[in-house]
């Protein structure tokens, strides 16, 4: 018998416009879509890559929380930056959140995002099998 796929939405206008979910759980995997440092249409940390990373990770972790998961369940992170100069600040934010967890991580410099004020976008993958009761 196959398990149901669960989806959660957020306040992101992109989810409705593109027909996607903030996060999808399938079996023991939970995948969090690319997440930017917005609450609705309000950008957090404009011009500050550290604050944008903290906000984006916070948004992504809020989606995981809706599945009863926290940072300890994260097994992979992906960080997309518009400037290589921001690697240290984004890395500092990542370390503060995930140092005890040590997920596999990827960091990529991209040419830009849909909103030119965005410096950072993140994705998370989590495993809920070990933490399910």
Image: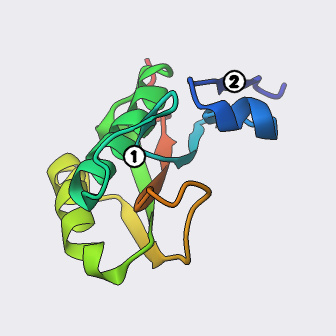
Q: Does residue 106 show up? A: yes
Which residue occupies the extreme bottom position in the image? 84
Q: Quadrant of residue 38?
A: top left
Residue at the image position 59 percent from the left and 31 percent from the top: 12
**Residue 132 drawn above or below residue 86:** above
Report the quarter where the C terminus lies. top left
The image quadrant that residue 16 belongs to is top right
Which residue shows up at 38% across the image and 40% down it? Answer: 73
The answer for how far apart the CA atoms under marks 2 and 1 are is 17 Å
Q: Position of residue 120 (x, y in %)?
A: 41, 59
On screen, residue 54 above or below 68: below
Q: In the displayed structure, would residue 71 be above or below residue 108?
A: above
Spot occupied by residue 62 in the image (x, y as percentages of width and height): 41, 27
Image quarter where the N terminus lies is top right
Q: Position of residue 7 (x, y in %)?
A: 68, 25
Image check: 13 left or right of 64?
Answer: right
Please name whichever residue, 37 or 4, is drawn nearer the observer in this view of the structure.
37
Q: Earlier in the sequence, mark 2 or mark 1?
A: 2
Q: Which residue is mark 2?
A: 6
* Residue drawn at x 47%, y 76% as measured from the top left: 108
* Pointer 1 local density, CA inside 10 Å: few below 14, some 14–19, many at least 20: many
Circle number at residue 99: none
Near mark 2 (Cα within 10 A), the count class, few <14, some 14-19 or many ≥20, is few
Q: Is residue 17 left or right of residue 72?
A: right
Say whether residue 27 is visible.
no
Secondary structure under the numbered disc 1 in the rendered image? strand
| Residue topped by disc 1 | 74
* Residue 110 position in % (x across, y down): 53, 76
């Amino acid at each position: 018998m196959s398990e149901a796929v669960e989806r959660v939405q957020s306040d992101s206008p992109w989810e409705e416009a593109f027909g996607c979910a903030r996060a999808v759980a399938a079996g023991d995997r939970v995948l969090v879509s690319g997440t930017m440092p917005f609450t609705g249409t309000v950008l957090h940390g404009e011009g500050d890559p550290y604050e944008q990373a903290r906000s984006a990770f916070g948004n992504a972790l809020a989606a995981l929380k809706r599945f009863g998961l926290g940072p300890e369940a994260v097994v992979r992170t992906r960080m997309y930056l518009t400037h290589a100069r921001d690697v240290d600040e984004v890395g500092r934010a990542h370390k503060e959140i995930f140092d005890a967890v040590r997920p596999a991580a990827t960091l990529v410099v991209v040419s830009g995002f849909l909103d030119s004020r965005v410096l950072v976008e993140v994705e998370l993958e989590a495993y809920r099998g070990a933490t399910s009761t």
